């Protein structure tokens, strides 16, 4: 078997066999097949597409490239969630403690911010002392002890995904549905989970702009998960405007904590309960989605989810006291109030523009190497549908340097769109699949 | 400007600008843009194609990646030829001395055998002592002194082409018309030539199977050459069976020498005179193609071309005496006579199968690293159209080891096809373009 022949088949739109894909991925990790052959194959796969068989073979090859989380002594059901990425999406921070508080184990391996979208790891790292770099051993120990752990990718789990992702990022082969599905499902399969809830987002702040495409992606993800014995469901949700009011790492942690205190913004609460409800059903803690949502709401309102969040902080090295956490989170030196340029109704509050403005303030990364400013970000004071008068504060921009503010302000005129009459309602949760 | 954005445009079928292509090639040579980004771009270019503008920009970027042959003191016209590759094609060895003998300078930079096709460099290296690795200085000195020189690629000329070709070979992106055109014309443009004759081959032994496609390639090559101020013409020729009777390096040198002695096989003589005739017209030594062919024939029949060939040997380090060269060429230890399995007419004598059989004997390379056996090869005793009886010798196989013979014999049954009646004639020279 030769890599060049495998590449040629894909180039010509033929199907690669399982053995061929296994060969490419394994020999690449062994440094026998060089990066440039993988890059050529990825581009051919991007343009020609991958069949379900090829996608499944790729997923399995990635899973088998490293270790898998082993929790043989835990009989509790293990459930994770995955979002396709958005702006202001701190749902994981709310959902994980709720679900764990109901006795379902949540072994969550998350990613970092890239482009205009945020990343759970960067949010967690805004918490003083919080470690996201647990070893596989520490991760397993935390799960056994507290029933939840939130970490980043480790060297031992799925090394093939990290190598492939770095190549895809450099070769413009990221936005391929089968490559995305293989990456997501392989990362989840190595967590040793029993079930998975997918949050597939559509709109300005998501990488998909049409609900039909999101639905297709969700179905492929559900099918791919099931091939690995992972029961899966999906929420199709709107990401045309940021979720909640906070965008930026420290600001989002604070909003998640307030949500666990029962004081969260309506949309964040709604989506969190939908997702937590599904996780509880799949985790065997609730009979129906409605029952799951109700159980999740109780865990939130009674404060036990907040206690579980405190466990999480302790378990992963933060010395922050949950009661004083909101005061201990990093704060920016300056806050700028952005006023409405006109009167009317907010017809759009575009998540992509808000996301880029937030990156400009220092909250995200325009390049992989860029450093994050944990305190920087945007608080939205008005969201889609709100009536506004000229000069009304629309957002607070948290920043440290004037240059950052100036760059961020460049994005805001395009972020807010106005109308004379209230815009038609747009549901946050569009559809539930697979449950 | 970022490589990933340039790749993305090509991936989506958009046109890259001249600056973008220049950036990719130059930064790749500077080791700023890594191989894997070039590999992804090559695959996107392979599948999406390149416009004439992109192809021209790529050609120029490759030309500008290194030095150019400089012969400021030579006022004589400089003309080269290029063949798209075939089996038994020793035309360069015949044509170069003929044309140089008529006072037109021939600065020829050739390639090596790969796959089932032969390479001029490997043929020349069958001559004891012959050096194909002249430095740029030595190449220029040889041209000034003798009016011809035949060498391989040097480190100083067109380094980008060598790096790109190595990547294309490993990433299944070789067979792309625009990439092929850019590679050929950039290699020729750095020779500092005034004119170029292209031999574009069609048939089993060529990489193109349809004359229409060959015609398209020839026209793109002619146009691309003209952009660099190189006047160009093309011969479309048949490569369904090997050219001449000899296939294999030492055997082909011997056949070329016999041709220069006026004793060459009909088809090789015909194509050599066609090409030499065109080179003489473009070189200003003849008024018309017919006059050029006649001049070429005289140079061959009077022996002055053979004398020029002797100059070439001397100039490039061979101590072989042209009068005894045929005895001094390497010979294989064994010769096997392959008999006809049946009676009839030879309807096909497939160049691809003969080429692979010759590679199996040791005359070529199935991998770039493979070593050549200069003495190995095949002498065809019958060619297409010949009447044969069962058991008649069709070919002599020159080999050193039984294993090589056995592997070669595996290809021969598919090489020879038979018919009850004489096959319809098939012209060797199909069309002349651009002259």
Image (cartoon, coloured by chain):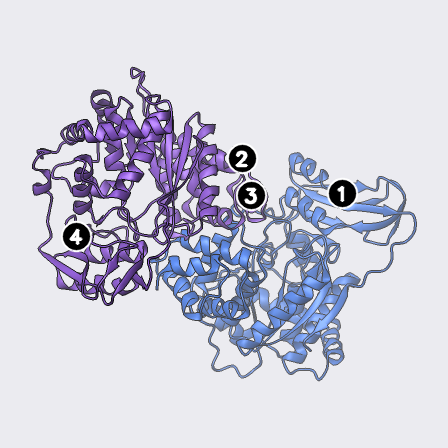
Chain colours: A purple, B blue
Quote the CA–CA distance across marks 4 and 3.
50 Å
- Which image quadrant for residue B230? bottom right
Q: What element carries label 4?
A: loop
- Which of labels 1 and 4 is toward the front? 4
Q: What element carries label 1?
A: helix
Whether residue B96 is situated above or below residue B418 in the rendered picture: below
Tell me the chain of label 1.
B
Are marks 2 and 4 in one subunit? yes
> Which numbered circle lies on residue A53?
2
Tell me the chain of label 4.
A
Q: Which of marks 2 and 4 is nearer the N terminus?
A: 2
Tag 1 and tag 3, C-beta contact below 8 Å: no
Find disc 3 in the rendering and name its residue. Answer: A5
A342 and A66: which one is in front? A342
Q: Which of marks 3 and 2 is nearer the N terminus?
A: 3
Find disc 4 in the rendering and name its residue. Answer: A376
Residue B68 in percent (x, y) is at 46, 72
Tell me the chain of label 2.
A
Query: Residue at left 67%, top 78%?
Result: B280
Tag 2 and tag 1, C-beta contact below 8 Å: no
Tag 1: Cα neighbours inside 10 Å, few (<14), some, or many (≥20)? some
Which quadrant would the N terminus of chain A be assigned to in this image? top right
Find disc 1 in the rendering and name its residue. Answer: B414
Tell me the chain of label 3.
A
Tag 1 and tag 4, C-beta contact below 8 Å: no
Quote the CA–CA distance across marks 2 and 1.
36 Å
Query: Residue at left 33%, top 26%?
Result: A291
Tag 2: Cα neighbours inside 10 Å, few (<14), some, or many (≥20)? some
**Would residue B318 appear left or right of B430 to someone viewing this image?**
left
Residue sticking out furthest to the front: A421
Residue sticking out furthest to the right: B421
Quote the CA–CA distance across marks 2 and 4.
44 Å
């Amino acid at each position: 078997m030769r890599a060049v022949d495998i590449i040629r088949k894909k180039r010509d739109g033929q199907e690669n066999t399982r053995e061929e894909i296994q060969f490419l991925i394994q020999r690449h990790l062994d440094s026998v097949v060089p990066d440039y052959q993988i890059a050529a194959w990825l581009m051919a796969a991007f343009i020609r597409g991958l069949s379900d068989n090829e996608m499944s073979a790729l997923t399995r090859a990635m899973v088998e490239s490293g270790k898998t989380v082993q929790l043989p002594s835990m009989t509790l059901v293990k459930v994770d969630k995955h979002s396709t990425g958005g702006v202001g999406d701190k749902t994981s921070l709310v959902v994980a403690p709720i679900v764990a508080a109901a006795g379902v184990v949540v072994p969550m391996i998350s990613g970092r911010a890239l482009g205009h979208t945020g990343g759970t790891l960067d949010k967690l790292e805004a918490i003083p002392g919080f470690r996201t770099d647990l070893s596989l051993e520490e991760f397993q120990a935390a799960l056994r002890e507290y029933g939840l752990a939130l970490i980043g990718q480790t060297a031992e789990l799925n090394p093939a995904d990290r190598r492939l992702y770095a190549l895809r990022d450099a070769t413009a082969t990221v936005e391929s549905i089968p490559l995305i599905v293989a990456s997501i499902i392989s990362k989840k399969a190595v967590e040793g989970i029993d079930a998975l809830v997918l949050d597939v987002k559509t709109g300005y702040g998501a990488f998909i702009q049409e609900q039909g495409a999101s639905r297709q992606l969700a179905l492929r993800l559900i099918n791919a998960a099931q091939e690995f014995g992972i029961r899966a469901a999906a929420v199709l949700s709107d990401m045309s405007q940021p979720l909640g009011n906070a965008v930026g790492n420290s600001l989002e942690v604070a909003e998640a904590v307030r949500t666990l205190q029962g004081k969260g913004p309506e949309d964040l609460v709604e989506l969190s309960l939908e997702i937590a409800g599904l996780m509880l059903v799949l985790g065997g803690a609730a009979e129906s989605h409605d029952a799951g949502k109700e159980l999740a709401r109780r865990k939130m309102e009674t404060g036990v989810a907040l206690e579980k969040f405190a466990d999480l902080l302790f378990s992963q090295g933060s010395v922050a006291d949950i009661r004083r956490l909101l005061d201990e989170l990093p704060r920016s030196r300056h806050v700028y109030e952005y006023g409405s340029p006109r009167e009317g109704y907010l017809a759009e509050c575009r998540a992509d523009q808000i996301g880029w403005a937030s990156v400009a303030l220092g909250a995200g990364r325009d390049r992989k190497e860029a450093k994050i400013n944990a305190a920087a970000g945007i608080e939205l004071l008005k969201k889609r549908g709100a009536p506004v008068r000229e000069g009304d504060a629309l957002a607070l921009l948290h920043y440290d340097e004037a240059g950052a503010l100036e760059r961020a302000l460049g994005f805001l005129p395009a972020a807010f769109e106005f109308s004379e009459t209230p815009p038609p309602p747009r549901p946050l949760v569009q559809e539930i699949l697979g449950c």
